[in-house]
Amino acid sequence: MKKFLLSMMAFVTILSFNACSDSNASQDPNLIAKESNEVAMKDFGKTVPVGIEKENGKFKISFMVTAQPYEIADSKENAGYISMIRQAVENETPVHVFLQTNTNKIAKVEKATDDDIRYFKSVFNKEERGESSKAVSVIPNLATLNSLFAQIKNQACGTSTASSPCITFRYPVDGCYARAHKMRQILLNAGYDCEKQFVYGNLRASTGTCCVSWVYHVAILVSFKNASGIVEKRIIDPSLFSSGPVTDSAWRAACTNTSCGSASVSSYANTAGNVYYRSPSGSLLYDNNYVNTNCVLNIFSSLSGCSPSPAPSVASCGF
């Protein structure tokens, strides 16, 4: 199985279309005029496609790390772009993607250069396990599990006890990878470790007030001893279940809430707790020092509900 190892992911470019005059473009060095009514804005994120599926006359594209789905119309004009995306999915290599402004719709795709690909691969680091060497893998009882859940929930953005960076449970649009990694850090600080569970598919979830769509979701999977001393496993994910830990089957069911539309799970997998992201094919990314984790959480910290969507850029985090 091919593994990409990361502490900080950096190469990626999204270019957004926008109406703008040449004079406005010249005032901003980040704006590059393409035509009189078209401007490409340099950004970082979502340029390694890891999945492509045809759905209702368009293709739904999954990109590395982000849980948000993106789409491109199945048209003759887009045939070359779709072919490039398919090739990039097969090789797990970057492409340059142009999005329509403030949407998840792909307008254009360009091949990455050899230098782009070399740079992308150069920013990956090896997996590190030292921080969990003394952590206990099984929580001793239900009371301790519930106490740990309370500690995690109290770090939610918008609570009086949350420290910085807080955990963005109230903004489910994206960032599950960062939320899960921060939850694991809280467990490690308390002397316990966990696994993670990644679920993939056409996922839809309800926050109670709105619905979100994902191509994958991830949360921490903890082991604990019940009253009979038997080890059981539970998911901790306050973004979906604020009342306490739940079984992984209940959690996956919440990720396919058909009241939000057609939904299904294509696969799921458990990983070690130090895995930051797992692609559908099994490639693994790491954020050993929580640099990306903390940065993403800070960017999303003031947001709540299902808007904005797509989520704001995490360019400054190096994605």
Image (cartoon, grey):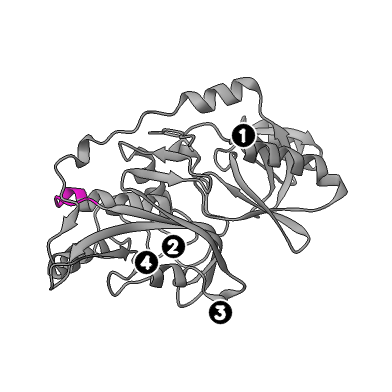
The residue pinned by badge 3 equals: 259
Secondary element at tag 4: helix
How crowded pointer 3 is (Cα within 10 Å; few <14, some 14-19, many 20+) is rated as few
**Magenta residues, start to end:** 188-193
Of the two numbered discs 3 and 1 in the rendering, the one whose residue sits closer to the viewer = 1
Residue 40: quadrant of the picture? top right
Tell me where residue 226 appears, x and y as whole percent: 17, 70
First-in-chain label (3 vs 2): 2
Tell me where residue 107 appears, x and y as whole percent: 74, 46
Tell me where residue 54 appears, x and y as whole percent: 72, 56
* Foreground of the two, 31 or 274: 274
Asked whether 192 falls inside the magenta stretch, the response is yes
Q: Is residue 20 visible?
A: no
Residue 91 marker: 1
Distance between mark 3 and mark 4 Cα atoms: 20 Å
30 vs 56, left or right, is left
Residue drawn at the location 21% of the way across and 66% of the way down: 150
Residue 171 marker: 2
Q: Looking at the magenta stretch, what is its main secondary structure?
A: loop
* Foreground of the two, 303 or 170: 170
Distance between mark 3 and mark 2 Cα atoms: 19 Å
At label 3, which amino acid type do we have?
A: Ser
239 vs 187, left or right, is right
First-in-chain label (4 vs 2): 2
